[in-house]
Image: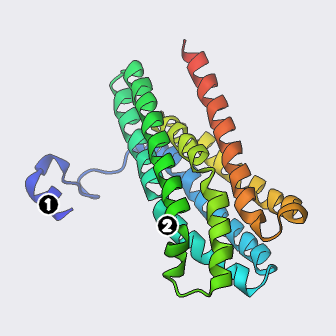
Amino acid sequence: MIYTVVKHPHLRFSFFSRPADAHTLKKSAVFGFPPSVQSGITSAGNVVLQSFMNGFGEKTVAAITTAYRVDTVILLPIINLGSGISTLVAQREGSGDRQGALNVLRAGLVLMACVSLALTLLVFTFGSSLIAMFGLSGDTVLIGRSFFRGLSTFYMVFGLSMALRGFIEGRGDMLASGLLGISSLTVRIIMSYVMKPFFGNMTIAYAEAVAWIYQLIVYFIRFRKVEKCQR
């Protein structure tokens, strides 16, 4: 911010010399409010999932909690690629280059597929070692490895859904993306309880995978609908 103020005078701002425009505030709220609501609901949903996970015992909780810590870092390339797609699509949409936005999506899908596959191979090769770094016992590491491998099998699905999400958000359709995020969390919670008799302590991994598949399908349907309307 200091660099911006010093080097680029045309980007300097003041709350007193330039009052906020009502139209701009409204437009900003349309972009900002859905993600903020989604973030709050997601935090509440994670509390429900944590309570569900606690029922599987101390070793499972330790293993899955650790796996999620590692998983959060490993998925950063996918999440950041999604943000990059969103930014580039927004730039092209803003300049009226609709075909350019589609080209960004195509390139993004290819990149996402490659990165997702690489991350899946990383987990299958080094997953146990990454979890063992946190000082867990042998049995707990095995639980974490099983969870990790079950979840990483669906990284490709998650990556492709994040590419489509980036495209949709880049076009300014934040409400649809926010609602889908909330409904996806709902699907994850419901499937955790439904699938528990079949998958035991691995239920959380497969429930999240189902939520990712749901996201991919709905994002694709939304993408097709928007493209059809603009033809």
Please say which color scheme the image uses.
rainbow
Q: Is residue 165 left or right of residue 59?
A: left
Q: Position of residue 149 (x, y in %)?
A: 63, 61
Task: Looking at this view, name the residue that lies furthest to the left.
Answer: 7
Q: Position of residue 38 (x, y in %)?
A: 62, 56
Give the SS element for disc 2: helix
Of the two numbered discs 1 and 2 on the same chain, state the one appearing first in sequence: 1
Reading the image, the residue beneath label 2 is 126
Tell me the kind of residue under disc 1.
Tyr
Q: Which mark is residue 3?
A: 1
Q: What residue is rendered at 64% in x and 40% in y?
A: 216
Q: Is residue 137 left or right of residue 162?
A: right
Res. 89 image quadrant = top left
Q: Please name whichever residue, 50 or 169, is drawn nearer the observer in this view of the structure.
A: 50
Q: Please name whichever residue, 7 or 198, is drawn nearer the observer in this view of the structure.
A: 198
In the displayed structure, 228 sits above or below 13; it is above
How crowded pointer 1 is (Cα within 10 Å; few <14, some 14-19, many 20+) is rated as few
Give the SS element for disc 1: helix
In the displayed structure, 78 sits above or below 59; it is above
Tell me the kind of residue under disc 2.
Phe
Q: Is residue 139 left or right of residue 107?
A: right
Q: What residue is rendered at 54% in x and 37% in y?
A: 164
